[in-house]
Amino acid sequence: MRASDRPVSEVVEYRVRSWLARFVVDLNLCPFARPLVTSDALRIVVCEAEQREAIAEAFVTELALISRASESDIATSLLVLPHALDEFDAYLDFIDDAEALLAEMGLSGVIQLASFHPRYQFEGESPDSLGNFTNRAPYPLIHFLREDMVTTELETYANPERIPQRNIETLTRMGRVEIERLMQALDD
């Protein structure tokens, strides 16, 4: 079956899984991702909504689900937004609201959010900085992490504070052409 014949959510999930495998794991951008990427405890939810209210509803639903589920059932979750929040500033505004919802639900310190966007740009960085690719994904997405899992991993990893700099060095060695080729090859 050709990609154009498959449901949108199936194509989107395939691309996200490809990004996780080829970019996040193979480049070791997250040294903790490898065991989870192939695990049934990784949950990927494709929210095809375009309106902010519907996205907020999907966010709250996912947040409630992961907070009630056991770690063995849902270790981590990705909420993927293929039809919304294309503009990075709008995405950041939504992330701010999402963090407020997290606090309102009493889940600060329990669940942590990580943000990824096709046009991710760190504050103070040039849009062309290769370091931005550490948080670039094929679609806007929100990663729900269990804070106790993150803490455990960081405690057992030597020099975790070096991870961001190591990632920037990896991407700089690769160069823009190779990074963009890798991102474009996610459908293969």
Image (tube, helix red, strand yellow):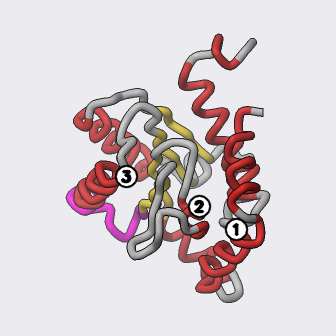
The disc, 1 or 2, on the residue closer to the chain's N-terminal end is 2
Q: CA distance from mark 3 to mark 2?
A: 14 Å
Is residue 32 among the parts visible in the rendering?
A: yes
The image shows residue 59 at horizontal and vertical percentages of 35, 43
Q: CA distance from mark 1 to mark 2?
A: 8 Å
> Residue at 51% of width from left, 49% of height from top?
118
> Residue at 28% of width from left, 41% of height from top?
56
Q: Is residue 110 magenta?
A: yes
The disc, 3 or 2, on the residue closer to the chain's N-terminal end is 3
User: What amino acid type is highlighted by mark number 2?
Assistant: Phe
The image shows residue 180 at horizontal and vertical percentages of 68, 51
The image shows residue 112 at horizontal and vertical percentages of 42, 64
Question: Is there CB contact under 8 Å for labels 3 and 1?
Answer: no
Say left or right for 50 vs 27.
Answer: left
Quadrant including the N terminus? top right
Disc 3: which residue? 88
The disc, 3 or 1, on the residue closer to the chain's N-terminal end is 3
Disc 2: which residue? 133
Quadrant including the C terminus? top right
Residue 8 against residue 5 in the figure, above or below: below
The residue closer to the viewer here, 90 or 30, is: 90
Give the magenta part as a residue range: 102-112
Q: Secondary structure at mark 1?
A: helix
Q: Quadrant of residue 161?
A: bottom right
Question: Is there CB contact under 8 Å for labels 3 and 2?
Answer: no
The residue closer to the viewer here, 61 or 178, is: 178
Disc 1: which residue? 171
User: What amino acid type is highlighted by mark number 1?
Assistant: Leu
User: What amino acid type is highlighted by mark number 3?
Assistant: Phe
Residue 165 against residue 65 in the figure, above or below: below
Instruction: Give me the disc on residue 37.
Output: none
> Residue at 65% of width from left, 36% of height from top?
15
